[in-house]
Amino acid sequence: MRVALITGASSGLGREYARRAVASGAYDEVWVVARRERRLRELADELGPSVVPVPLDLTDRASVDGLAGLLRSREAEGPFEVGLLVNAAGLGKFGTYADLSLDEVDAMVDLNCRALVELTQVVLPHMRRGGRIIQVASSASFQPLPGLNVYAASKAFVRSYTRALRFELRGRGIYVTAVCPLWVATEFIDVARDTSNGQTVRHPFPVLSARHVVRWSLLVNGVNYPIATCCVTGLLMRVFCKLLPAPVVMWAWEGLRRL
């Protein structure tokens, strides 16, 4: 039994990764994880019986423990492996330190960082040579971003963690990639604006399609490259943020976010 496990599958990138996993025919089952059970069941109805809804709130530590138990029980039943792990669940909020509540800050750090690491930890013992791990980060991870500071910092954590994990897994034949796209046409922007100052970033652009990001990230992961920017603009941003001092980048962002 070979499965794909995809978080954040109720919408956006996670939903598109699930579609691609089913279409590939490489997995006996595709486990889709998210809080919204109705959305997961709709996805299962759309994609067929290989899709297994796993409704969980990953901000609850007990959910990760429950998933770990489910993995162990399935392995005890016979040959079993996770062939693909996609950590696409994530949360962002627009606003400076003065605009965000403690609950909003905690939710971003909890879901973007803790849950991603814990889920990776419990899945890795069930992965074999040929397995693939995709961690959804962001081009926001390349530099500090005032007005999007906690989200950008959490994605910088994901990118750094993913690169180190890839090094630790060398020789095991498990491919690991951090996906760092620009803005993606999903529900993310509407959710990010739902704060006390949702216009901190006025006009996010350019916007990529979820299908484009998923297709390119899977290609990049297929050659075991550590970072997938998924577009030329993202690649240039990555390069320039290595060359320019952080204060210069932040002042440039300060102007762009107000446009």
Image (cartoon, grey):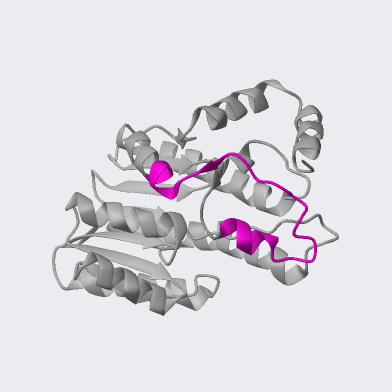
Quadrant in which the C terminus is drawn = top right
Residue 184: percent from the left, percent from the top?
52, 48
Q: Is residue 205 magenta?
A: yes
Image quadrant of residue 252? top right
Q: Is residue 255 left or right of residue 132?
A: right
Seen at 47% across and 74% down, the residue is 35
Seen at 20% across and 50% down, the residue is 24
Residue 94: percent from the left, percent from the top?
72, 56
Q: Is residue 202 left or right of residue 218?
A: right
Q: Is residue 124 visible?
A: no
Quadrant in which the N terminus is drawn = bottom left
Q: Is residue 62 visible?
A: yes
Residue 206: percent from the left, percent from the top?
58, 39
Q: Is residue 113 left or right of residue 67?
A: right
Q: Is residue 74 magenta?
A: no
In the foreground, 111 or 50: 50
Seen at 39% across and 54% down, the residue is 86
In the foreground, 145 or 10: 10
Residue 29: percent from the left, percent from the top?
21, 64
Seen at 77% across and 50% down, the residue is 147
Q: Residue furthest right?
A: 98
Q: Is residue 214 left or right of residue 238?
A: left
Segment tinted magenta in the rendering: 188-214
